Amino acid sequence: PRPPPQHLPPQVKKKSIKLTGCAEFVDFLPVETPPRREEWESPMERKARRHREKLEKHKDELKAIAADYDPHKDPNAVGDPFKTLFVARISYDTTEKKLKREFEVFGSIKRVRMVYDQKGKPRGYAFIEYEHERDLKNAYKQGDGKKIDGRRVMVDVERGRTVEGWMPRRLGGGRGPGRQGKPSKKKAKRLAAEALEKGKEKDKEKEGGKEKEKDKERERDRDRDRDRDRDRDGEKDEKRKERDEEKHEEKKAEKKKDKDKEKDKEKDKEKDKEKRAEAGGGGKEKTKEKDRDRKRSRDRSRSRDRKAKKARD
């Protein structure tokens, strides 16, 4: 058998606390103004604040440097600026001799100056001064995108001393990307394929638009045809109704005519009866005499036939 259930003491009802409003405790609250809350900054907010402060500091420094910037007073900027060519995106392995040998094709070079940083490493751009301005123009037109040590260089004229108000990129100026170099064969093929795909998509869109217009025109034509058919059907129905009404009227007229004929026949019959009644018995005797004559004619024809048979026999 199962064990007996566990004995538990009876539950005692607790006294419920009467809840009241807070108006009774207002007198116990302090009257003085609370202290100022301490501002807390999260790690993300701290990082964003520091970054913002750095940017503002950098902008102030750039403004100060830009105010003192004067390329004409630069001791390294030597030579005629209108005969100087700017070459950028140069490989770090390229030397001044290699650069001079590559650009001597366009004309005689007077000076080549490669720019280095404080540690003596090349910055990737240089200035080439030609002896004649026509050589500079040839180099500017034909030298852009030339491949030197596996990299395509970008060519431009010197703008620091020739363009008024021009600022270098490190001071927030520059020309942006400049002239784009010649794309490689793979890139040219990819660009051509993309252009073809875009052209095909545009053609498809145009064709789709034309097809939609054609569908709309077809729907309009169908609606017009339906309206015309409805009008024709309405006219046909009206004509049919008129024909049916005419036929109905004709039938009515024929029925009236038949009724009139029947009435006329009945009147004629009544007139005949009246005439016969007026004639009286004389009519009956005449009919009897007619019957007798018919019988006699039949008997005579029979006797004639018998005689003719006997004569043949």
Image: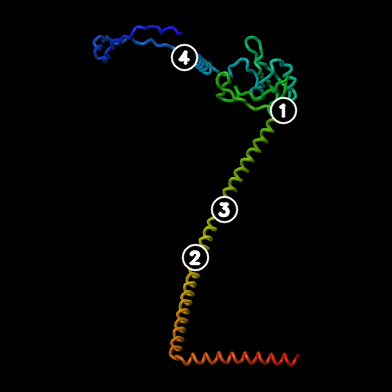
* Residue at (44% x, 12% y) in the render: 41
* N-term mark: 1 or 4: 4
Q: Is residue 241 above or below residue 168?
A: below
* N-term mark: 4 or 3: 4
* Residue at (55% x, 89% y) in the render: 291
How packed mark 2 is, by other alpha carbons closer than 10 Å (few <14, some 14-19, many 20 or more), is few
Q: Is residue 133 visible?
A: no
For the residues marked 3 and 2, what is the alpha-carbon distance in whole angstroms? Answer: 28 Å
Amino acid at dot 3: Arg
Foreground: 70 or 184?
Answer: 184
Q: Secondary structure at mark 2?
A: helix
Foreground: 9 or 135?
Answer: 9
Q: Dividing the picture into quarters, in which one does residue 82 lie?
A: top right
Q: Is residue 212 above or below residue 197?
A: below
Q: Which mark, by number, is residue 45?
A: 4
Q: Tell us which disc is closer to us: 3 or 2.
A: 2
The residue wearing badge 1 is: 186
Foreground: 102 or 277?
Answer: 277
Q: Which mark, by number, is residue 222?
A: 3
For the residues marked 1 and 3, what is the alpha-carbon distance in whole angstroms? Answer: 53 Å
Q: Secondary structure at mark 3?
A: helix
Q: What x and y, as percent, mark residue 309?
A: 72, 90
Q: Which mark, by number, is residue 241?
A: 2
How packed mark 4 is, by other alpha carbons closer than 10 Å (few <14, some 14-19, many 20 or more), is few
Q: Which mark, by number, is residue 15?
A: none
For the residues marked 4 and 2, what is the alpha-carbon distance in whole angstroms? Answer: 90 Å
* N-term mark: 3 or 2: 3
* N-term mark: 4 or 2: 4
* N-term mark: 1 or 2: 1
Q: Tell us which disc is closer to us: 1 or 3.
A: 3
